[in-house]
Image (spheres, helix red, strand yellow):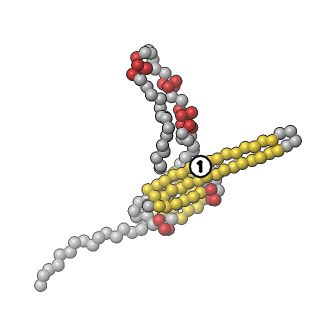
Amino acid sequence: MSLVKRNGSLFPKLLLNDFFDNNTVDISAMFDFDSDFSRYGLSAKIPSVNITENNENYSIQLAAPGLEKKDFKIEVENDMLTISSKKEQESDEEKDNYRRREFSYQSFSRSFQLPENSQTDKIEAQYQDGILKLTLPKKEITLPAPKKEIAIA
């Protein structure tokens, strides 16, 4: 997840007098969640994720229907796994008396801090039926040798 600078505030400023000048406070009038969230790009759909673990590996399943393999970008940097996607579509239809042009843009990015026992160089990914599946094999963590006392002869 990245920090995003915003100009303005997501929530309006409330003054103490706002509560005492009226008998009731209409919360719905103070907040317009739909326009506030979409103004800052927060209305984007973030895919759901299931993360499981067994003795051999970690598994990440990300629900992203309607995409293709080529739409995904998977990167690992400093033990941070980032899955992102950008998809642009454009259609142009021209008939005798009209022209219709449509476009859409979808994008998302999800990041995960990887455990120290994951083998980042052996991550496997596959996309099938709208589900992106990543398998992260575990590596054995070698414990330091126990303290051993040596007798002097």
Residue at the far left in the pictured view: 153
Q: Residue furthest front?
A: 7
Give above or below for 55 relative to 50: below
**Would residue 138 be visible to someone looking at this image?**
yes
Can you give x and y, in whole percent of width and height, for residue 128 in the image?
Answer: 62, 58
Front-most of residues 64 and 72: 72
Q: Position of residue 60 (x, y in %)?
A: 51, 57
**Three-letter amino acid code at disc 1?**
Ser
Q: Where is residue 63 in the image (x, y as percent from the top left)?
A: 57, 51
Q: In the rendered image, which residue does mark 1 sit on?
A: 107
Image quadrant assignment for residue 95: top right
In the image, taking residue 145 as reference, residue 124 lies left or right, namely right
Q: Seen in the image, is 99 located left or right of residue 20?
A: right
Residue 21 percent coordinates (x, y): 43, 15
Q: Residue furthest bottom?
A: 153
Taking the image as shown, residue 117 lies to the left or right of residue 8, namely left
56 lies above or below 6: below
Q: In the figure, residue 40 lies in which quadrant? A: top right
In terms of depth relative to the viewer, which is nearer, 61 or 32? Answer: 32
